[in-house]
Amino acid sequence: MKFFNYFKKPVSSGKKSCPACNKENRGDAKFCIFCATSFSRGNIICVCGASNDERACFCQQCARPLEANMSEEGKEIDSLAIDSILMSRYKILERIGVGGMGAVYKAIDIRLGNKIVAVKEMNAMAVIEIEDRESVLEAFRKEAEMLANLNHPNIPRVTDYFNYMGNQYLIMDFIDGITMASFLKITEDLLTESRIIEWALQLCEVLNYLHNQSPSIIFRDLKPANIMIDHKENLKLIDFGIARLFKAGKNSDTIYLGTPGYAPPEQYGKSQTDARSDIYSLGATLHYLTTGRDPGTSPFSFSPVRNFNPHISEALENLIMKAVKFKPHERWQNIIEMKQVLSSLRTQVETAGIKVPQEPSTSIYKTETPNPLVVSLSGLCDYQTISEAIKVAKAGTIIYVHSGIYREGLILDRAVEIIGEGKEGEIIIESENSSCILMETEEASIRNLTLRCTAGIKKYYGVDIPRGRLVIEDCDIRSDSLACIGIHGAKAAPVIRKCKIHDGERGIVFSKEGKGNIEECEIFCNKKENIKITEKSDPFIKQSKIYKGKNGGIIITTKGLGTFEECEIYDNTLSGIIISREGNPIIKRCKIYNGSRGILVSENGAGLLEECHIFNNTKSGVEILDRGNPTLSHCRIYDGNLQGIYIYKKGEGTIKNCELSGNKGAGIEITSEGNPIIKNCKIFNGKSYGIYIWLKGAGTFEECEIFGNVLPGMEIGENCNPTVKNCTIN
């Protein structure tokens, strides 16, 4: 390949490539500032083929010991001793990784109840040159500062940073898992498409979080070796050593870094890296997952996925091949685009009967299951309260709860499963001074419980989820306080299945980048909204019924997102769906009916509606105002008691390939500087005008069919200026 030379020669004068890691250094450097390989001394070649400095104790590539540099006792030089206590706080348990200039240790924080942590050590003294040492220290400091300001479930948290005995240390969340690179080495078979999609969606989530920082963070080294997989197959992005803040106005990066095969061409002097650079690396990683071929063996060269793995769908192949295009403008332009296509692929896989599991069908790890505990008010079992059982439970414990009313609030601070043993409605948790459930761990589950929060003005949620993956199944939830369920913060990502969420102040509230999956639930009869999504929250809601909300069915506002698929939204006061203040959801194959308005879009709200049925609403099927700008595609809007679509007060929108029929008002009414784009639509059999434009209304109409309406197909008032192209009007 003609582009392969980017990795083989310096890209500018005064630079030289490290023979071990291929990263660029100053021309006069004696040691690589990234992996400490010597440019002047002899190198030791490991059995894996990697080159190492002659003084190294362990291979910088595979961490195997280099026998020539081991002490007589067989121990590595300059390592933290097992059972030693760092800074009078962190007790070292074992070393779990080695790099060119340091190591990573598993330790316990003795000040915080022996919490397991990871200790990342950087030994700057491995770099001889003072200038290089300073560069290394600065890079390590920047990594610490960057991680300390990030808060995402797919990024380990930094809790401490300090200098000790000349070495630098980061204290981070310990990830009980292995790297994706290690997992791929021990996996004999190619991964299933469903698993690849799930992993890809997780990586999209974390990259989207980084890219939406201010300024944006470009990771620049996404690859299997920098992705950890925990025992629940949650992915964690590690090693932010070469991540950078995006700097607008720069033509190119000043430092050329990355891993051959995964790094895009612009990362080697072609132009400045941006979000599309991470998209390329994600595509390269997915190519490896689907084909089993390491892209590092042939950088910039990606054969079609199905040449190696015919079991992968053509759609997934196309997505990956677009991500690895050589030119940035030919790739996905942002991670949201890529994520939306992946979400659709997941749905297609499920529809085809290949169910994407919420939990892995096979586990990487085998763990022992603790003995279950039993709770009963009778006193004849292990415990009389659920809280008592939780306090003594080990991670993975199942707690069975017998019938009765348990007047307590539960704090889930460990990975337990609480199952109601009895008929529906017989196991009741009732709390008047707290939330019924407060989630304070990474994962837990509850099943077959009735939850009643009666805190009123004390402002609690029935179920409060500020973090973690709480699985809620077959539960009945009500709260007269803030909401039945509150999901808030980027760390919150519950799974809620087959639940009834009703008669509360609100049903479910997503805020502060909260996420989660809602499946086959009924959300109804809440005093305000049944569902509220704000502040970049992005849930996935599928096959659920959302009805009889007193202040609307669903409200998406203040940059809220979300994906709704195959839901029924009906009998809601005000509107079935309200989108405002830059809300931007995806709504597919939903039915919105028997409400006041079907959909209201205002205040720069947007959104994509595909293949939806909007019908039998007492006011407009769709109402757009105040620069609302949604896209409707292949929707049917019919049998409304007023307009099919009403656009006014500078409302906009793109309506394409839709059918509007049987509405008592105009099929489409535009007024007060409304200015939509209407393409390839059929507007027919209405009880009034097909299209009615008045009072400075405008709009563009292309290739539409307007026929069979009681009043004229198109009525245009004075001072209106629509554009009509290739339409048939009868």
Image (tube, rainbow, N blue to C red):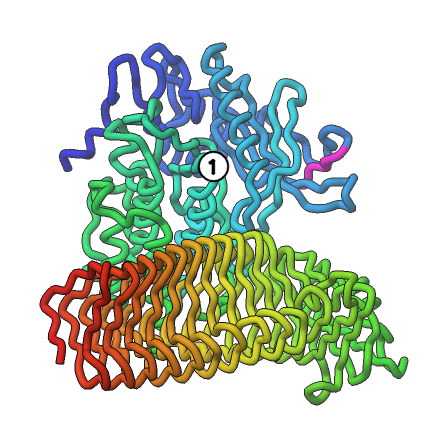
Residue lying furthest left: 726
| 329 is higher (above) or lower (below) than 436 | above
How would you classify the magenta stretch by its main secondary structure?
strand
Where's residue 601, x and y in %? 42, 63
In the figure, residue 278 lies in which quadrant? top left
Q: Is residue 335 left or right of residue 413?
A: left
Residue lying furthest right: 379
Q: Is residue 234 left or right of residue 427?
A: left
| 711 is higher (above) or lower (below) than 122 | below
Where's residue 532, x and y in %? 55, 64
Where's residue 666, x and y in %? 30, 77
Q: Is residue 91 magenta?
A: yes
Q: Secondary structure at mark 1?
A: loop
In the figure, residue 7 lies in which quadrant? top left
> Residue beneath label 1, please?
214
Choose between 64 and 618: the one closer to the eye: 618
Residue lying furthest front: 718
| Quadrant position of the N terminus in the picture | top left
User: Mark 1 packing: few (<14 Cα in 10 Å), some, or many (20+)?
Assistant: few
Q: Inspect the image, locate mark 1, and give the three-letter code of the amino acid beneath it.
A: Ser
The span shown in magenta is 89-93
